[in-house]
Structures are given as structure tokens and as C-alpha cells.
């Protein structure tokens, strides 16, 4: 199982296109395998935001891959389901439409839901965008970022975007406060509609309060492979993240999906050691140890020990995106102030993820901070 690591100086063409072509070659992926196929480019388009914020896959990164696919005889469409708003608005706001100008690339249908059975999995049905089924090959184009609930968002997590719009909230609701169950869903979904290759935009990544409110981080890397778990495992190693804090790895192993064993992955291009960073900040909440204990124990402790979303009322502009996104409807606008019902909150941090003003962050109560120091060395 090959995963390539390639250095890249930035988002300038044609140099970026050359770097991506090199990354594909080192990963063992032949672009000629795309000839005469309908190919879906699946970037990370969390919301309509300028590329400089490092929230979304850079439009010129998408263009470079579109050019490579077209050069090799593919028919190309692009699409993703943002957390808020529709695909077309997001493609425009993220400058993807502008970036693809002059190319014969269509916009995939991510508005029409299709229900499919997943009989072998824990999650028996998935609702997936029609445009996914209209493609013959998916090229997965994640942005490398931290994630409040899953610790890391990379190749595997990015495929959650094939679920249309606010229907993502249904999967959060099904998983409840169990991060492990949500991670299992992500893994099952990703391998149900497995991309032919994942090419991670880690040229400018995001650390800190990801995936929507963190800070751009100049990493200068493209990480590529045909197995999403293997790609994510290499990314975790580069960032210095403990794989035990990233629940998709344990769930992939339980389901015998993907290659999460570092020893079983052949790294080509740059070595992990030569590009490893030491100052990449995780999202503050990350993976909670409370998810590892039974619900009847965890639930009474959660409000006192675990991170919870908190609103900075000075930054909040009352746009209402957090209210619309919340899968359990625990957020309300009361007297021009955002209020959260922590008894109902499942700690999915969708509100933090979608907030365009960086007004929502994760805070741990004082008792929780003390307990974490003693029990979990956090």
C-alpha cells in the first residue's frame, strides 16, 4: 500500500499540476485509468469562504486535478454538499467556479438524495447525493485540518460530504454522543463509495479550532494514496498526532477496512521524518475519554467533565447558521442571544464547524480540567 508525500511551494500553475502528477505517480495511481470515465471531483467545501482562510480545498488545487483528468480522457464533474447553503453558492463563494473557468467541467447533482442499503454494516442505510451515483470514479480532494469531534479531518472524513445538506445531521443524531459510533459510520460510508484516489491539500492546512475556525498553517505538502485510512494514518504521523486519539482508525480496524498499520504502508517521495512538524495544534476538544465508558456513567459526568460548545456573544452576529445546523435543535435565539441547552447537546460540534465568525469554541469546565489532568494526563 503506497502513500506518497510530495512537497509543494504553493498554489501556482503549472507548478502545482506537476507536483500533483508526481504525487499520483509515486502513489501508484495511473491517470489513464480514468479514460472515458465520468469522474467526480469531491473537494472539501464546508461553506462559502475565501480560499485564504484554509477552510476549503483550494480552487487551483481542484483545477490542477481537473486538468490532469481531462488530459487523460475523463469527463469531469465537481461537487460537494456544504454544511450550510447549496453546492452552487459554495462553489462560487469558494472561487471554485472562477478557478475552473475555461475547463469542460460540470457541476454534479448534490441536491437530490438517493437512499441506498448497506446491509453488511452497522448503519443499514445511507442517503447519498445523486451526483455520486452518476460518476464512475471519485477523486477525493480533502483539505487537511483538525476536527473537534474526530480530531483529524482528512481523506476518510471528507467523504461525509456525499451526504446531502442537512441530512448529515441525521447521522449525527443516530450516533448521539458516541464518537466511536460516528467514526464507524464515517468509515462504512467511505468504503461504501470508495474513491479511486485521495489527494490531500496540505499545502496550507488548518490547525487549532478546526475544521472551520482554525488558523492557516503553511505545511507545504500533498499526501496521496488509494486507501483513505492509509492516507489519514500518514497525515497523523506527519502532524505528530497520536493515532489512538483519532477514532476512525480503531473503527476501520474493527471492520477490517483500510490499512491503518503504519508498518504496512510504503511511504514514497518524502519520508515522514523529513516533513514531520511539532507545533501543529489540535482542536481543543478532540477525542473525549468519556466516549470510552458506558452511557449510564458518561451521561451524568458529561456536563461537568467534557468540552462543550460555548458562544462568544461579542463575535456572534446572530446569523442563525448554528441553529439551522444543530441535529438535536438544542440552540435557540433568546432575546438576541444564542443559548445552548447542554442537556440536549450531543457534543457533535457541528455548530463550531459551521460558524462563519469563529464565535463558537470548545470550553471544558474547571472540574473537567482538573479531572483530565489527574485521570487522562490531558
Image: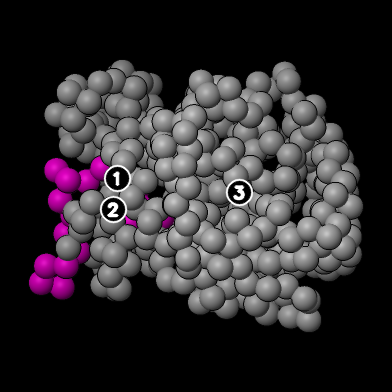
Q: Nearer the viewer, residue 248 or 301?
A: 248
* Comes first in the chain, label 3 or label 2: 3
Q: Is residue 55 visible?
A: no
Q: Secondary structure at mark 1?
A: helix
Foreground: disc 1 or disc 3? 1
Q: Is residue 38 left or right of residue 112?
A: right
Judged by its main secondary structure, the magenta piece is loop
Look at mark 1 in the image and give the residue it sits on.
173
Quarter of the image with the N terminus in it: top right
Q: Where residue 9 sits in the image (x, y, percent)?
A: 80, 57
Q: In the rendered structure, does residue 350 fall within the stretch colored magenta? A: yes
Q: Residue at x 68, y 73 (%)?
A: 106
Look at mark 3 in the image and give the residue it sits on.
144
Q: Please report contact status of discs 2 and 1: CB closer than 8 Å, yes or no.
A: yes
Q: In the rendered structure, does residue 261 fall within the stretch colored magenta? A: no
Q: Please report contact status of discs 1 and 3: CB closer than 8 Å, yes or no.
A: no
Q: Please report contact status of discs 3 and 2: CB closer than 8 Å, yes or no.
A: no
Above or below: residue 131 compared with residue 5 = below
Q: Where residue 99 sits in the image (x, y, percent)?
A: 71, 75
**Quadrant of the rendered structure where residue 60 is?**
bottom right
* Comes first in the chain, label 1 or label 3: 3
Above or below: residue 317 compared with residue 131 = below
* Separation of residues labelled 3 and 2 (CA atoms): 25 Å
Q: Nearer the viewer, residue 34 or 43?
A: 34
**Quadrant of the rendered structure where residue 236 is?**
top right
Q: State which region is magenta.
A: 333-353
Quarter of the image with the C terminus in it: top left
Above or below: residue 190 compared with residue 371 = below
Look at mark 2 in the image and give the residue it sits on.
327
Amino acid at each position: 500500500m503506497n502513500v506518497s508525500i510530495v512537497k509543494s511551494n504553493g498554489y501556482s500553475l503549472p507548478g502545482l499540476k506537476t507536483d500533483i502528477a508526481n504525487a499520483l505517480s509515486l502513489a501508484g495511481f495511473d491517470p489513464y485509468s480514468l479514460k472515458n470515465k465520468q469522474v467526480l471531483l469531491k473537494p472539501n467545501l464546508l461553506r462559502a469562504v475565501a480560499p485564504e482562510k484554509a477552510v476549503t480545498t483550494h480552487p487551483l488545487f481542484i483545477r490542477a486535478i481537473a486538468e490532469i483528468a481531462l488530459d487523460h480522457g475523463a469527463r469531469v464533474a465537481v461537487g460537494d454538499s456544504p454544511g450550510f447553503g447549496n453546492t452552487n453558492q459554495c462553489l462560487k463563494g469558494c472561487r471554485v467556479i472562477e478557478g475552473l473557468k475555461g475547463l469542460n467541467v460540470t457541476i454534479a447533482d448534490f441536491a437530490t438524495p438517493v437512499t441506498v442499503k448497506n446491509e453488511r454494516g452497522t448503519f443499514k442505510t445511507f442517503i447519498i447525493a445523486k451526483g455520486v451515483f452518476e460518476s464512475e470514479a471519485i477523486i477525493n480532494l480533502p483539505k487537511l485540518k483538525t476536527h473537534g469531534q474526530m480530531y483529524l479531518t482528512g481523506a476518510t472524513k471528507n467523504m461525509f460530504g456525499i451526504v446531502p445538506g442537512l441530512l448529515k445531521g441525521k447521522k449525527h443524531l443516530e450516533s448521539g454522543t458516541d464518537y466511536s459510533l460516528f467514526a464507524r459510520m464515517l468509515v462504512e460510508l467511505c468504503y461504501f463509495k470508495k474513491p479511486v484516489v485521495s489527494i490531500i491539500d496540505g499545502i496550507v492546512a488548518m490547525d487549532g479550532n478546526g475544521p472551520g475556525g482554525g488558523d492557516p498553517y503553511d505545511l507545504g505538502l500533498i499526501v496521496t494514496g488509494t486507501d483513505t485510512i492509509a492516507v489519514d494514518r500518514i497525515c497523523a504521523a506527519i502532524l505528530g498526532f497520536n493515532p489512538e486519539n483519532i477514532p476512525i482508525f480503531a473503527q476501520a480496524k474493527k471492520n477490517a477496512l483500510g490499512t491503518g498499520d503504519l508498518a504496512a504502508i510504503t511511504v514514497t517521495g518524502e519520508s515522514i521524518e523529513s516533513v514531520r512538524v511539532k507545533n501543529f495544534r489540535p482542536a481543543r476538544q478532540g477525542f473525549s475519554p468519556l466516549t470510552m465508558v458506558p452511557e449510564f456513567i458518561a451521561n451524568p459526568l458529561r456536563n461537568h467533565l467534557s468540552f462543550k460548545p460555548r458562544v462568544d456573544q461579542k463575535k456572534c452576529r446572530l446569523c442563525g447558521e448554528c441553529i439551522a445546523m444543530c441535529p438535536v435543535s438544542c440552540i435557540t435565539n433568546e432575546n438576541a442571544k444564542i443559548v445552548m441547552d447542554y442537556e440536549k447537546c450531543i457534543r457533535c460540534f457541528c455548530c463550531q464547524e459551521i460558524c462563519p465568525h469563529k464565535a463558537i469554541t470548545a470550553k471544558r469546565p474547571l472540574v473537567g480540567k482538573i479531572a483530565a489532568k489527574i485521570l487522562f494526563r490531558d
